[in-house]
């Protein structure tokens, strides 16, 4: 029997699951074609050999936990026909999927197949976080489901387990700056919010889906050149600000935890390999461009200093020194005094994609919340679109759509602001007005969502 112990990081993530906390992530894939559950099973049966972990379960006898082959593996158990639903029904199914734990007696994944109006099909794919982080799950999706319709442009398609390049920061320099990094990233600077509560088992979800090119355009035209992730973080902050304003809560002192993938090509195929940085959300500023510039400055400094790698080195070193001290420190790092919410961003394939031979229309991601953090945002991009997936404790975050609408409005406002800035600059230089810039509302309608 094949048996492989979980890495310490994977085992730690597995242990986070509890009576009200589910350990899985979820991808919702919508395609322009009618596909049955049996067709999905037939397709996966031909490809699962490329991802053998999906045919393994938690070994029922070993400790520490290990993966072993599931002698009763059956695609009929894992790929389930949920019949026909409308879009509202799909959202409710996704809520239930985020509320329902995966069966530990079998491999920790499941896929619901849903027939949608207009000849569309949705695949609601749950994967336990101990089995795959965002980058690993995206690679699984590439192996099992995603196929480019044509060769993708060079430099547009991230390599498996790739990560954005970071400036090389020497270990000596990171060690010298360790105390400053710990104070910056783990200091008790976040102000408690209504999100900082013990969460229940009920979930609500919402999605914002926008053109990826619009976020690129905003970042390129901003006063301080910003990345897509900078624009996304700023938009999430604005959505959160709208909700806090609505319930009469303060908007200062909020911080966002941003996971940073440390996967490297050539490394063993581990499920989880990431670190993080913490970014202050400048929500007290009223101008969208001011908020974006403030976020961009922070992320640039974190990258330049190598903060994510420094934190990874620190926790790994601590685990060799004292397991109990490492556990207490990681517990503190999860405190709402350190960060308000977690916002992850995983890049997918940029060009048009096929799934089961049908065009990919939408790809959304969700990640589970945690005690003290009743809202989580998972961002994923694919096929020219970027999706913000919001998952929340239904009882703690009433009005999740208000946050989603605020994200869309902020992207629209930033698009208009950078267009106005560029137009003013060009007008001053040439004496001619620039044509009205592209706006997100043109694609999404007046509601912006």
Image (cartoon, helix red, strand yellow):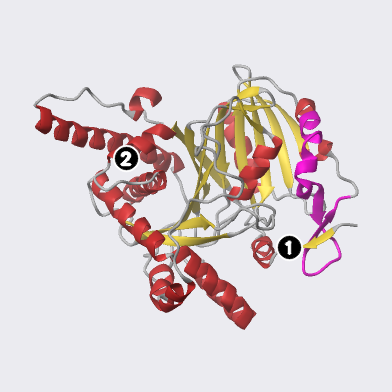
Q: Quadrant of residue 13?
A: bottom right
Q: Is residue 106 located in the magenta-colored stretch of the structure?
A: no
Q: Quadrant of residue 263?
A: bottom right
Identify the residue at image location x=51%, y=72%.
332
Question: Is residue 125 visible to us here?
Answer: no
Residue 6's disc number? 1
Q: Which is nearer the eye, 173 or 311?
A: 173
Q: Which mark is residue 136?
A: none
Looking at the rendering, which quadrant does residue 222 occupy?
top left
Q: In the image, residue 369 lies at what x, y percent?
A: 55, 54
Please say if 306 is above or below 235: below
Mark 2 and mark 1: Cα distance apart in space: 42 Å
Quadrant of the image containing the N terminus: bottom right
Seen as rendered, the residue at the extreme bottom is 321
Mark 2 Cα within 10 Å, few/some/many (few <14, many 20+)?
A: some
Q: At 90% from the left edge and 46% from the top edge, which residue is drawn?
A: 72
Q: Earlier in the sequence, mark 2 or mark 1?
A: 1
| SS under mark 2 | helix
Residue linked to disc 2: 220
The answer to whether 367 is drawn above or below residue 115 in the figure is below
User: Horizontal and vertical percent for residue 439?
Assistant: 31, 28
- Say whether residue 55 is magenta: yes
SS class, disc 1: loop
Task: Judge by depth and name the residue closer to the eye, 318 or 378.
Answer: 318
Crowding at dot 1, Cα within 10 Å, few <14 / some 14-19 / many 20+, comes out as some
Q: Which residues are magenta?
A: 41-70
Q: Is residue 41 shown to the viewer in this render? A: yes
The image position of residue 285, as x and y in percent, is: 24, 52
Disc 2 versus disc 1: nearer the observer: 2
């Amino acid at each position: 029997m094949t048996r492989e112990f979980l890495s310490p990081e994977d085992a730690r993530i597995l242990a986070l699951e509890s009576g009200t906390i589910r350990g899985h992530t979820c991808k919702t894939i919508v395609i322009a074609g009618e596909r049955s559950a049996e067709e999905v099973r037939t397709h996966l049966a031909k490809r699962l050999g490329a991802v053998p972990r999906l045919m393994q379960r938690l070994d029922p006898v070993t400790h520490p936990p290990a993966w072993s082959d599931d002698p009763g593996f059956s695609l009929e158990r894992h790929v389930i026909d949920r019949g026909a639903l409308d879009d509202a029904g799909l959202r409710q199914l996704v809520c239930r999927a985020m509320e329902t734990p995966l069966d530990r007696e079998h491999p920790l994944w499941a896929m619901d197949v849903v027939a949608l109006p207009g000849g569309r099909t949705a695949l609601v794919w749950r994967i336990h976080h101990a089995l795959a982080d965002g980058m690993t799950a995206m690679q699984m999706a590439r192996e099992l489901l995603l196929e480019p319709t044509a060769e993708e442009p060079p430099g547009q398609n991230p390599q498996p387990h790739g990560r954005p390049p970071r400036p090389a920061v020497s270990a000596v320099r990171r060690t010298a700056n360790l105390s400053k990094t710990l104070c910056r990233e783990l200091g008790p600077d976040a102000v408690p919010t209504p999100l900082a509560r013990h969460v229940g088992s009920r979930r609500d979800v919402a999605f914002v889906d926008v053109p990826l090119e619009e976020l690129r355009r905003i970042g390129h035209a901003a006063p301080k050149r910003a990345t897509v992730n900078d624009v996304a973080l700023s938009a999430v902050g604005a959505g959160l600000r709208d909700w806090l304003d609505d319930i009469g809560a303060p908007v200062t002192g909020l911080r966002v935890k941003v996971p940073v993938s440390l996967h490297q090509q050539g490394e063993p195929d581990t499920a989880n390999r990431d670190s993080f940085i913490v970014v202050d959300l400048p929500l007290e500023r009223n101008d969208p461009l001011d908020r974006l510039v403030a976020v961009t400055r922070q992320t640039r400094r974190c990258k330049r200093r190598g903060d994510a790698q420094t934190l990874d080195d620190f926790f790994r070193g601590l685990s060799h020194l004292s397991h109990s001290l490492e556990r207490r420190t990681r517990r503190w790092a999860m405190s709402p005094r350190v960060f308000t919410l977690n916002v992850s961003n995983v890049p997918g394939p940029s060009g048009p994609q096929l799934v089961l031979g049908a065009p990919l229309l939408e790809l959304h991601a969700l990640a589970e919340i945690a005690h003290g953090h009743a809202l989580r945002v998972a961002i994923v991009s694919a096929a020219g679109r970027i999706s913000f997936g919001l998952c929340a404790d239904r009882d703690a975050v009433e009005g999740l759509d208000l946050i989603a609408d605020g994200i869309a409005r902020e992207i629209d406002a930033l698009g208009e602001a950078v267009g106005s800035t560029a137009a003013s600059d060009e007008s001053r230089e040439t004496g001619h007005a620039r044509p009205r810039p592209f706006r997100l509302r043109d694609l999404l309608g007046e509601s912006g969502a």
